[in-house]
Amino acid sequence: MRVGVICTGSRTWTDAAKVGDVLTAILPGVVHVGDCPRRSEIGPDGDFVDASADYLVADFVRLRNQSDLKVHYADWEAHARAAGPIRNQAMIDSFLEETVDVRLCIAFIDSRCFTHRSGTADCMRRAHAAEITVLEVRSE
């Protein structure tokens, strides 16, 4: 069975292990993700850690080399604040063209700062509208 996954999530998401655990459990054949770059955040032990759900998902998929990775870029220069929602819809549209048996949207949500106006929330709404099952993975 071929599983397709769209991953979305908080720019402040730092739990690379949880990203790996979730993707390993699902074993997707194809992963679609946005292009939010790596950021540095202060982790629970006071050290700087990589942050951005998009970055951590793409990094995990590239390292494992077990899934097709499709990164979707937002044109911030051309579309300003509309770039994220435009990219999210393009990602959904592209994902719906995939030949898969199961479609999931995995949302890695940093509970400390999630709002319903965020890009993650927008992508989740668009996935629901496209009848894609949404799995919320929240930070501790």
Image (cartoon, rainbow, N blue to C red):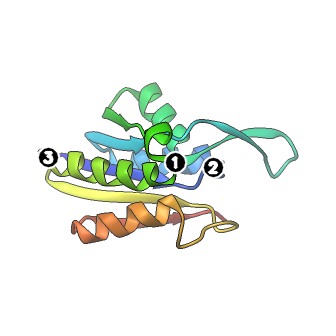
**Left or right: where does residue 127 sit relative to residue 84?**
left
CB-based contact (under 8 Å), mark 1 and mark 2: yes
Q: Which mark is residue 97?
A: 3
State the quadrant of the C terminus: bottom right
**Left or right: where does residue 107 sit relative to residue 90?**
right
Q: Could you tell me which residue is drawn at 36 percent across and 52 percent down?
A: 86
Of the pair 39 and 5, the residue shown nearer to us:
39
Q: Nearer the viewer, mark 2 or mark 3?
A: 3
Is 95 above or below relative to 119? above
Q: Amino acid at mark 2?
A: Asp
Q: Amino acid at mark 3?
A: Glu
**Left or right: where does residue 95 sit relative to residue 119?**
left
Q: Earlier in the sequence, mark 2 or mark 3?
A: 2
Q: Which residue is mark 1?
A: 19
Of the pair 80 and 52, the residue shown nearer to us:
80
Q: Amino acid at mark 1?
A: Val
Q: Quadrant of residue 132?
A: bottom left
Q: Which mark is residue 130?
A: none
Q: Could you tell me which residue is drawn at 25 percent across and 48 percent down?
A: 4
Q: Could you tell me which residue is drawn at 31 percent across and 54 percent down?
A: 89
Q: Which residue is mark 2?
A: 15
Q: Position of residue 78 (x, y in %)?
A: 44, 39
Q: Position of residue 41 (x, y in %)?
A: 76, 45
Of the pair 114 and 21, the residue shown nearer to us:
114
Q: Quadrant of residue 38?
A: top right
Q: Position of residue 45 (x, y in %)?
A: 85, 48
Alpha carbon of mark 2 to alpha carbon of mark 3: how far? 30 Å
Alpha carbon of mark 1 to alpha carbon of mark 2: how far? 7 Å
Q: Could you tell me which residue is drawn at 62 percent across and 52 percent down?
A: 13
Find numbered disc 1 in the image and state the secondary structure of the residue it sits on: helix
